[in-house]
Amino acid sequence: MHLSSRAKLLIGLAIVVVLAAYVYQALGPSVWSKVTPQIPQIFIDTLLLGNLYFLIAVGITMTFTVAKFANFAHGDVATVGAYAAYLLYNFAVLSGAPNGFAVQVGLVGVVSGIILTLAYLKTKNSTLMVLGPALLVMGAVVLFACYTGANLWEATIEAMLASAVVSLLSHVLVYKPLSNRGASLVQLMVASIGVALFIRYALYEMTWYSRQYFKQEITYQNFGVQLSNFQAWIINGTLVIANTTASFASEYIPAIKIGAGGIAFTKLNALDVMFKFPQPVLSFTDLYIWSTLTVLAVIIGMTLLFKKTKIGKAWRAVANNPVLAAACGIDVDSVVNLAWLVAGALAGIGGLFWAIQTQIYPELGWMILLNAFAVAVLGGLGSFWGTFAASYILAFAEQFGVSVLAAINPQYTGYRFMIPFSVFLLVLYLKPEGLAGIKTRKA
Amino acid sequence: MTDKVIETKDLVAGYGKMVILHGIDFYVTRQEIVTIVGPNGSGKSTLLKAILGIARVLKGKVYYEGKDITNERLDKISKMGVGYVPQTNNVFTNLTVKENLEMGAYTIKDKKEVERRMEEVLDIFPDLRGRLKQLAGSLSGGERQMLAMARALMAKPKVMLLDEPTAALSPKYVDLVLNKIKEIRDSGVTIILVEQNARKGLEIADRGYVLVTGKVAYTGPAREILEHPEIGKLYLGLK
Amino acid sequence: MVDKTGLILGIIVAGIIAAFAAVNVSYTLDLIFFLAFYAIAALSLNLEYGYAGLSNFGKVGFIAVGAYTAGVLSAAYGVPFPLCLIAAAIAAAAVGAFIAIPTVKLREDYLGMSTIIIGEMIRILLRNTPTNSVWGGVFGLRGIKPPFDFITNTFERTIAYVGLSVVLFFFTYILLERWGNSPLGRVLKSIRDDELASKSIGKFTYRYKLLALTLGSALAGLAGALYAFYFLYLNPDTFLPLVTFLIWVMVIIGGMANNAGVVLGTAIVILINRLTQIAKDYIHLPLEPNYFQAMLVGLLIILFLMFRPQGLVPEKPVRTPAWRVLEERAPKEIDYLKEGEGGEENE
C-alpha cells in the first residue's frame, strides 16, 4: 500500500498518458483535424493567458513567502485596481469637461496624501511612509486626468497604486495585528476571506450606488480601450504580420514581413487582406504585447531586485528567517510591507489586463483567484519560478482543452473552468509539493 | 562598575502567559566573556531572548550601555551594536554564504567598508573563504555555526550574544568554535555565552552565572564555579 | 451547566422566534427550517474546523452535492425520500474523502485552497449540465417529489417536514456532542492543537482528519438533501461561496469546538439576516442591504478573530469520567484548569 512518492508519480503519469491516448483514439480524426490547424493560435493564446495568470499568482506567491499564509483577498485586491483604472479611464472627463466628482476625489486624495506624508515625517511610521505619497500621487493623477483626458498610462498607474494601497492596508490593519495576537494559519486564511468579502461587496455597493444615483451602469462593462488587432499569415515562407484594425478605415494597412531575406516594413492593400488572404495563422491584440512586456519587466525587475539589491536580499532573508533578519538590523516590518505593496501593485496591473481582456465586474478578481490558486499550488506555493512555469502550463492546458472541447461540440466550452481545476486536482494527487518540489529533488 | 555593557535588573520574562525568568540580575562588563550555564529549561536562552526583546519582559529592566532597551525591537537593538547568534536556524539557508555575510553588514551603508569588513571576518574564519558562492543551507553543522558567528561579526558588534554555539557539533568543532570565541573577544568584543557544555564554556569565561528554574543560583568568577564542590555536581554534571 | 453569555443570548433568540411565531406562523416555520438547515451545516463545519482544525472553505459544494444527489434521485428515478437522504449523505461523504485523501497530509493552506476550488468546481459543473436533462443546468432542477405526500393539507405537510428537519438537527447535535466528548473528539482536538504530539503518542492523525472531513461532508450532504426537499427546486447559483462563509461566521461567532455555541451563532446570524430584511422595508439607507450584509459578514469575521477568537461561547474542557471525579473532589484545581483552557465564566 505504501508507495514512495516517486512511484506514485510515475504510476499516476502512466495512467494519465494511457488516458490521454485513449481520449485521442476515442475522439478520432474528425476532432483532431479541427484542432491541429489551431495549434499556433493556441500557443499565442497561452502566452496571453499565462501572462495574466502570472501577474495575479506571483503576488500570492510573494505574500506567501513573507506572511506564510494563502491570501484569499488577493483577487479582490486586483478587482480594486481594475475598477480604479476603469473609473478613471471612462469618467475623468465627462462630455468634454472635467468630471466634478472625480475632481473632488482627486482633491481628497491629494490632501489626505499630504496629511499622511506630514504625519510620516513626524512619526517615522513605515506604513505612512508609503501610504502618504501613494495617495498623493493617486490624487494628482486623477486631477491630471480630469483636465487633460485620461489615457491608459494614467489608468495603469492608478490601478497599481490603488491595489498596492489596499493590499498594504489589509496587511497593516488585519493580518499583522492578527498574527501579533498569535492567530493560527487557518484563522489568518479565514480573516483574508473576511477581507475579500468586505472588498468585493463594497465594490458591489459602489456599482449599486452608481446605478442608483449616477444612472451609470458599471458592472459587466467593456473596459473601453480600443485594442488593435493583428493578424499573421505565412505566405511563400514569409511571415506577414498586419495591423488589421485599420482595414476598414484606410486603403492600405501597415505590415511587417519577416522571412529569410530579413525584416521589412510594407503596406498591404486592405481589400486584398480582407478578401484574398487565407485564414490567418495567428491573430492577437495589443494586450498580448503589453502583457508580455509587463511580465518580462516583472521577471527582470524581480531577478535584479532579489539578486542585486540590498533590499531584495533583505526580502529573501526575511522570508527565510525573520528573527535572524531582525538580528541583522533589518527592519522586518518595512520589508514585509514592501512585499504586500509589490504584490498589490502587480495584482492591480493584472486586474487591469483581465478587465481589458474580459469585462469589469466586482466578482472579477474572485473568478481569477481560484485559477491563480491552482497556479500557485502547481508552482509549489512560494516558489517564484515554479509559479512562472505553472502559469503557462495551466494556461496551455486550458487553451488546448478549450479547443478540443469546441471541436467536439461548441456547447462544451462552458466547461473550460474545469480544465485548470482538473489539472490542479491531478497535481494534488500526484505531486502535492508542485513544480518546486521537482526542482529541489534535482538539487 | 560604570563599564557594564549589558545589565538586567530584576528581570521577569517569558512567552505569552508562561513566565520563565523570575527576577534575574545580570551584567557583563567590557571585553568580558560571561558564560551562562544551567540545566535544561532553566531559562538560559530565554535570558538572551529577553535582553534582545524576543521574549516578552513582564517586569524589570534591560540596559545597554546605561540606556533602557527593555522590550525594544530586535532590529533596533542590533543596530546599537548587539550581535546575536541563535542556537538553531542561525543562517539564511536560501542565501549564499556571501549574501549571508552581506546581510550581517546590513546596517553598514558604505560598500567599501562592507568589503573591508568581510575580509577581516574571513581572516578569522578562513574556512568560509572557499564557500562564498555556496548556499548556506548546504553547509555542515559546524560550518553553519562558523558562518553564523561570522555573520554576527560583520556588523562590528560591541557585544555578542551566543546561544549554545557548540550544541550538536562534533568534538573537533567544539574546540574550534570556543577558540574562535576567545579570538573574537580578544579583538575587543564583549561576549555573553549560553553553554550546555558547562566545563568547556566556563573554561574560556571570565565570569559565570548558574541559572536554575529561572533564577540565578550562583554567580562568580568562572574558575570558582568550576572548582566549587557542590554547584558542579548539583546542576552541571561536572565531577 | 450552560455558560452565562450563552444562556442570555439563547433566551433572547428564543424570544425573537416566539415573537415571530405570534405574528406569522408560516414565516416562522420557514425561519425554523433555515435554522435547522444552517445549524446542521454549521455543526458539520464545527466538527472539521472546531474539533480537527481543518479549513474547509468548500462547505457549500458538499451541500450542493447532497442536494443534487437527492434531487436527481427523486426527480428522475422516484427514489423514496428517506433513501434520498441517505444517498445524499453518502455521495457528499465520498466527495469529501476524495478531496481529503491528498490534502489532509499537507499544510492547512492546501486544504483551504483545494476545498474552495472544489466548491466552485461543483457549482460550475452543475451550471453547465445540459438544460434539457434532469439536472437542468442554469435553469435549475425541477420535479423533486414532495416528501410526506400522503398528507394532503400543504400547511400540515410543511409542519411535518420542518418538524423532521428539527428532529434531524437534534440527532446531529446529539451525535456530535457524543463524538466531541468521546476519544475521537479528544484525539481531533489534540491534532488541532499539536499534531506532532498526537502523532508521537501513536495516533494516526491522517486517518482521524480524513474521518472528520468525511463525516463533516456527510452531514453537509444531509443538510443539502433537506434543502432540496424543502424547496423542491434547485439552482446552481444558490450554492455561492458566500454561503460557505456565512457558515464560517456562524462557527466563529458561536465559538469553535462548542456545539451549543455554534447553534447559537447560527441563530444569531440568521436572525440578523431576517431582521435586516424586515428593516429594509421601513428604513431607507443609501445602501443596498444585501451587499451591505455581505460586507458585514466579512467585517464580523475579522472583528471576531481579532477581539474574541474564542467566540461568544468559548470551548469547554472535554467531559470525561476523570473530569467528573475531579469536579467533585477538587473544585479549585478544576477552576484553574478551566482558565488554562481559555474559559472565562464559571459554570
Image (spheres, rainbow, N blue to C red):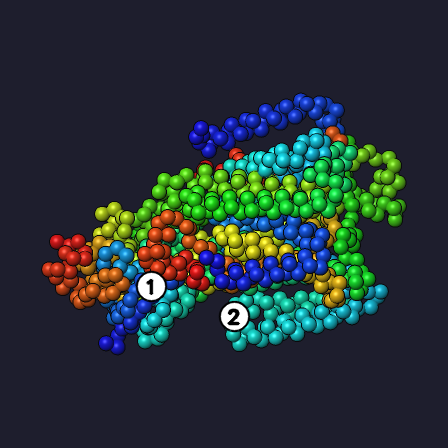
Circle number at residue A179: none
- In the rendered view, tell whether residue B209 sits above or below residue C65: below
Q: In this rendering, would A43 be left or right of A425?
A: right
User: Who's the residue at 64% across and 70% down the image?
Assistant: A136
> Which element carries disc 2, helix, strand or loop?
loop
**Hey, which quadrant is residue A14 in on the image?**
top right
User: Who's the residue at 47% across and 29% down the image?
Assistant: A7
> Which element carries disc 1, helix, strand or loop?
strand
The one of B223 and C337 positioned closer to us in this rendering: C337
Q: Position of residue B116 (x, y in %)?
A: 37, 61
Q: Please, which chain is the residue tagged with disc 1 on?
A: B
Q: Amino acid at mark 1?
A: Val
Q: In this rendering, would A324 be left or right of B231?
A: right
Q: Position of residue C132 (x, y in %)?
A: 78, 34
**Hey, which quadrant is residue C161 in on the image?**
top right
The one of B43 and C324 positioned closer to us in this rendering: C324
Check the picture and name the quadrant holding the C terminus of chain C: bottom left
**Closer to the observer: label 1 or label 2?**
1
Q: Position of residue C167 (x, y in %)?
A: 59, 45
Q: Position of residue B62 (x, y in %)?
A: 33, 71
Q: In this rendering, would B105 be left or right of C259?
A: left
Q: Please, which chain is the residue tagged with disc 2 on?
A: A
Circle number at residue B19: 1
Q: Are marks 1 and 2 in contact (CB under 8 Å)?
A: no
Q: Amino acid at mark 2?
A: Asn
User: Who's the residue at 35% across and 49% down the image?
Assistant: C322
User: Who's the residue at 54% across and 37% down the image?
Assistant: C97
The one of A408 and C318 positioned closer to us in this rendering: C318
The residue singled out by tag 2 in the image is A125
Q: Separation of disc 1 and disc 2 at Cα?
A: 31 Å
